[in-house]
Image: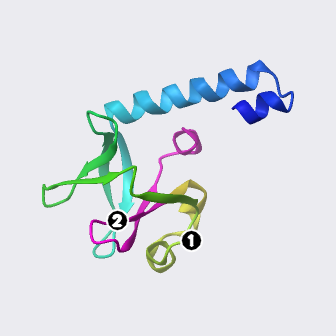
Amino acid sequence: VLEGLRRGKGRRRATSVLVGHNEALIALRKGAPLLKYGRHGKPHICLFKLSGDEKELEWQSRKGSKKAVSFLQVKTLVRGHQTEIFRKQALAAEEPLSMSLIYNDASGKARSLDLVFQDADQLDL
């Protein structure tokens, strides 16, 4: 946002970025249903939401256990089907709506959380 203002992009752009950020926070606090691809089994819908302290992205596994990824563990976000899991399983039509969070698990191993959003607006939030 600051970089855009320095380049003379104007106040309007900064405001729209902040509004988009606020909308994303509200949606994640309430919970957003996303299609989750895993290493095993079929893709399935999970409700993803922010933890109470907003430091983790949480969801419930199909077996009922609570799962979470700390934002401190996330190394990068990748759009499309760039991960091995997506390349093996995903449908080509889902690629524009797909995103992966690349993170290190508790043991330091690189993992991905591979998600498909309902539409482009949800992905852009």
Task: Note whether 115 is above or below 50 in the view shown.
Answer: below
Closest to the observer, 76 or 98? 76
- Image quadrant containing the N terminus: top right
10 up-or-down from 45: above or below: above
Residue 55 image offset from top left, x and y in percent = 34, 41
Q: Residue at x 40, y 51 (%)?
A: 72
Q: Earlier in the sequence, mark 2 or mark 1?
A: 2
Q: Separation of disc 2 and disc 1 at Cα?
A: 16 Å
Query: Residue at left 57%, top 29%?
Result: 20
The crowd level at tag 1 (other Cα within 10 Å; few <14, some 14-19, many 20+) is some
Instruction: From the top left corner, tell me how far across and down residue 33 is, in percent.
Output: 35, 44
Q: Element under label 2?
A: loop
The residue wearing badge 1 is 82
- What's the mark number on residue 43? 2
Instruction: Please report the residue visible at 27 percent of the width from the left and 72 percent of the height from the top.
Output: 107
Q: Is residue 41 left or right of residue 22?
A: left
Q: Secondary structure at mark 1?
A: loop
Count the marks.
2
Q: Nearer the viewer, residue 70 or 58?
A: 70
Position above or below: 70 against 32 = below
Q: Nearer the viewer, residue 83 or 42?
A: 83
Residue kind at label 1, given as amino acid type: Gln
Q: Tag 2: residue type?
A: Pro
- Asked whether, in this view, residue 117 is left or right of residue 69, the answer is right
Residue 7 located left or right of residue 100: right
Q: Residues within 10 Å of mark 2 (few under 14, many from 20)?
A: some
Q: Quadrant of the C terminus?
A: top right
* Region rendered in magenta: 101-125
